Amino acid sequence: MTDEQAGGAEKKITKIGRVDAAAVLLMSLGEADAAQILKHMGPKEVQRVGTAMTQLADVTQEQVEAVTGQFLEAVGDQTGMGIGADDYIRTMLTQALGEDKASSLIDRILIGGNTTGLDTLKWMDARAVSDIIRYEHPQIQAIVISYLDPDQAAEILSNFDDKVRLDIVMRVAALDSVHPQALQELNAILEKQFSGSSSTKTSKIGGVKRAADIMNFFDSTLEGELMDSIKEADADLGGEIEDLMFVFDNLKEVDDRGIQALLREVSSDVLIIALKGSDEEMKEKIFKNMSKRAAELLRDDLEAKGPVKISEVEGSQKDILTIARRMADAGEISLGGAGEEMI
């Protein structure tokens, strides 16, 4: 393959995103090797990469070679023979799966943990988890909710009545750290047992930011009702949570470079539906960060798109926000806007 061909293939892979690139890499490995890698992923990682694998189409040999080349180049200076093995694992998984998945996945692998105990809940249906913790002490419920990913936590909380949901969210906001012994006792309650590190350090869990992250994943009606209840119970806490929440309208504050990077990861279908519920300022923010031709096509698609249910608009907006938070966690964009101080 010529340098020009390689460059073109790499551009295509960059455009389709890291998850798709990981899917291409796994598909090229074969079933057995790919299965060994997937065994070490969490439920969200498996779902995202698995979905990407099912949607792959018209992948050229040049693209496969480009993805493989990028992967080998990234780990070429590392060694898996004992010296620098941790660095090798971190680099390999980060390159293959993206920064957003690396922290929890890598820590679990390197520390020697597994998917027992609380981690098992991440694989379960939200309603099933709700039933498991429904009659536990509220503080135990808060620890479980804090431990799970915000989107799953929000779905679980949706299965509780208003008073219980309010109590749990406020307890989540009040949490700071939990001693490993407490987590081990919780695992015993869940008839599971941790097999990881014996460190005596406390584990950071919960807090106002975590409560805000969970609130972000409620539908707008439930979110509004719950926020009103929190403010009624504790106005200062409600204000703190509200300040830390990031909603679709806040994308106006993201700088142009960040919006451009975000748009490369968002499908046009999702973007069109999301913008159906946006004001002109938000639409102009998006238009100005696209090529003239792409902006014209998007305007035409918006005009041609018929009425859309509010639930569909909110769903698409939350999908975009999920991508934005992932990219922010990976350091690819800043959600604080152009005026945020960089360090």
Image: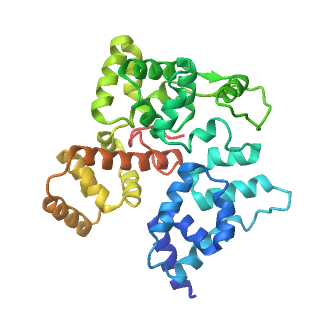
* Residue most extreme to the right: 82
In-image side of 257 versus 37 (left or right)? left
220 or 195: nearer the viewer = 195
Q: Residue at x 27, y 50 (%)?
A: 274
Q: Residue at x 56, y 77 (%)?
A: 64
Q: Residue at x 52, y 74 (%)?
A: 10
In-image side of 141 versus 239 (left or right)? right
* Residue most extreme to the bottom: 2
The image shows residue 148 at horizontal and vertical percentages of 54, 36
How many numbered callouts? 0
291 or 15: nearer the viewer = 15
Can residue 128 be seen by looking at this rendering? yes
In this picture, is 215 found above or below 29? above
In this picture, is 50 found above or below 177? below
Q: Residue at x 42, y 37 (%)?
A: 155
* Residue most extreme to the top: 233
Residue 183 image-quadrant placement: top right
Residue 240 image-quadrant placement: top left
The image shows residue 263 at horizontal and vertical percentages of 36, 58
Quarter containing the N terminus: bottom right
In this picture, is 155 found above or below 106? above
143 or 320: nearer the viewer = 143
Can residue 150 be seen by looking at this rendering? no
